[in-house]
Amino acid sequence: MQSTLIALVEDKPGVLTRVTSLFRRRNYNIESLTVGHTENPGVSRMTIVVDSSRTNVEKVAQNLYKLVNVLHVEDVSERPNVLRDLALIKVQADGGSVRSEIMQLVDTFRARVVDVALDSLMVEVTGTEDKIDGLVDVLRPYGIMEMVRTGRVAMARGNSGNGSK
Amino acid sequence: MKKTGAEIVWAMLEHEGVEVVFGIPGGTIMHTYHPRRNYGVYHVLVRHEQCAAHAADGYARASGKVGVAIATSGPGATNLVTGIATAMMDSSPIVCITGQVATPVIGTDAFQEVDITGITLPITKHNYLVTDLEELPEVIHEAFYIARSGRPGPVLIDLPKDVQQAAMEFVFPDDEVHLRGYHPVGKGDPAGVKQAAALINQAERPVILAGQGVIMSGAMEALRAFAEKTDTPVAFTLLGKGGFPESHPLALALMGMHGEVFVNRAIQEADLLLALGMRFDDRVTGRLDAYAPHARKIHIDMDVAELNKIVRVDVPIRGDLRQVLEQLLPLVSPADHAAWRERIDGWRAQSHKRDIINRPENGHLAAPHFINAIWEATGGQAIVVTDVGQHQMWVAQYYPTDYPRSLITSGGQGTMGFGLPAAIGAQIARPDKEVWAIVGDGGFQMTMHDLATVVQEKLPLRIAISNNHYLGMVRQWQEFFYDKNYEATHLWNPDFVKLAEAYGIRAWRAANRRQARLAIAEAHAHDGPALIEFEIAGEGDEANVYPMVPTGAALHEMIERPTYVATDAVDLISRPEQGSGDLLGAIL
């Protein structure tokens, strides 16, 4: 079972280190962690995915709160939410028929081709991790040359804000 | 007015009410040392930075104020690490200020550069690397606030040399601290408090487990009122000692691995445990799945991450202990648990009959005898600072105290070498009190260089070395669990009396009870530092700490004291000699 935590933190040097150091120190296992800016200057947002069968999610949240630079922590796993991952996949495509096959698959997954080279295509796909895994599976036989995934970002649905205000 | 970073450090320390700091100067911090004498902050020069951190810790625990340690960069900073970890584990408020290489050369492996904020990240409550002088006043103000508020702990400020040298227009920061992500709690959630009160009112066999939180939140009076109204016996953790008067009829004794059998039995038989400002350390619970099986559990703590961490409880309450107890008091009904108390007293009476204190004179000296003799000589009024090991457990058992902040000891980290430097800090914090450092021969040799600090500062510190020529607690485990294979635990020791005399410290040696009482009486009367070396047995049943819950055993599965049945056993605390000032007269 995976749990998704959203942490709002002060945008100050070393805050990411404090968070990752906490995970190492308490022997918590991170599946993925993303950081980025938010609508508030000075506040960064982390989406942290942990394996809740091996790590006590409540304790993760409580220990995150003990960090002076952490403003708000929320477990959105049990709430209606939108979870997204983004991947860039460079796949081999040297013949004309291969190329059109790949384009069809990309369409089916509502992904898009963002770069075309003589012998390859770069595909951008956004969606849940399951959806991206599915695309990766069908592209693998063509030869994946390179791939990068952002890891999960998450947001709860509805009117509630994120508690940073 | 324009001030340099160095001057701002002292101005801010003064502003925070700091009277004394412990430290050693060096290359990157000497600029800060330079203007010190223009400010009202006294500096104690120690002999190793580890001792600066421990002394600041001892100062904090004895006074309730924030202790301060100062060191240079590189090795000066890393030498603080053991002391910082010790303070972190025991929630002791200290602020450490370290020099750092100048900002332009940070990251270049400059001379005596070390990433001390990186190193101390997991062992500080918070830390700062100040790269902009403008931030310095606010950072120092925040550091003291964070160190002492909420669940207290160590804070480190790393100060590059060029920031100390730079100057700016200085004004004191606002009193109010602006920390968006840090809000210590006060009162407990009323619903939880109500639930707790209901459980308390139903209980027939309640036990209070009092931890250091009682002392830190100043809840001594609140606890006493609560225990008396609900007629609930009070057991304590090692660091909780002093939060409830041990001479009180409701006082039990130390719980856990070396707790008294009657206390652990009461916990195992209880139908309600009230855990107050403690954290269910493995040394307290024994085997978890067999811990207090009949008890509902209420846990009150400042730190929400401690609730349901080790032991699942029925009612967790996050809050300041004093405030929560004050919320609870009007909600609980007066109770009379006489039957329960009598059962516990029955177990207690058996414990005392087996007690080593009641053995007749046999020519040997056992540590409980000299520790109890120190208790008698000081009337239980001294501040006792221990090192770590067997003597530490014996102090917990044989130096009962009625006062908070009168036992200072490294609990969570179990830091050998803590005793002497922490006692230096305690004596400086409390010049009005008699302070005894009770240490083992192993731990003492880890920091004994700071005898020089004792003399340089003219401290009237009393040092008692419990010398069994062993790393005694390890040897005891080897005896019990490793086929008596005393691997690397036997110690060749110097002549501690001569050593003390080399420092100009008056010293005595005692090898039996009579000599011990004499030496203690003389050290007690001596005006100036004093050291007594107590020669105690290295092996045999008087050389082991009993009772003992072996690792992995349930709390009631204790190795009890070897059988010696006294016919005239009496309660330690009601012994007639208590507080008799004229010991010499009594002996001679």
Image (tube, helix red, strand yellow):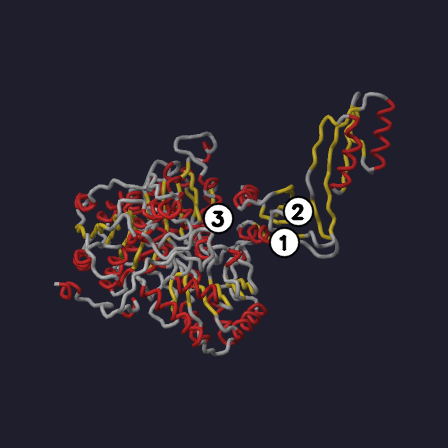
Eye-nearest disc, 1 or 3: 3
Residue B140 is situated, as x and y percent measured from the top left of the image, at 43, 50
> In the visual, does B347 lie left or right of A145?
left
Circle 1 residues within 10 Å: few <14, some 14–19, many ≥20 = some
Q: In this view, does B480 lie above or below B318?
A: above
Label 2: which residue? A38
Whether residue B239 is visible here, answered yes or no, is yes
> In the visual, does B289 lie left or right of B226?
right
Query: How far separated are the C-alphas under marks 2 and 1?
Result: 10 Å
Label 1: which residue? A164
Q: Which chain carries label 1?
A: A
Q: Which chain carries label 2?
A: A
Residue B417 is situated, as x and y percent measured from the top left of the image, at 33, 46
Q: Say which of B139 and A59 sits in front.
A: A59
Q: Do the residues labelled 2 and 1 touch (CB within 8 Å)?
A: yes
Residue B251: quadrant of the picture: bottom left
Eye-nearest disc, 2 or 3: 3
Q: Say which of B564 and A73 sits in front.
A: B564
Query: How far separated are the C-alphas under marks 2 and 3?
Result: 24 Å
Label 3: which residue? B126
Circle 3 residues within 10 Å: few <14, some 14–19, many ≥20 = many
Q: What's under tag 1, amino acid-wise? A: Ser
Circle 2 residues within 10 Å: few <14, some 14–19, many ≥20 = few
User: What residue is rendered at 62% in x and 49% in y?
Assistant: A7
> In the visual, does B556 lie left or right of B532?
right
Which labelled disc corresponds to residue A59? Answer: none
Q: What's under tag 3, amino acid-wise? A: His
Residue B159 is situated, as x and y percent measured from the top left of the image, at 42, 41
Residue B431: quadrant of the picture: bottom left
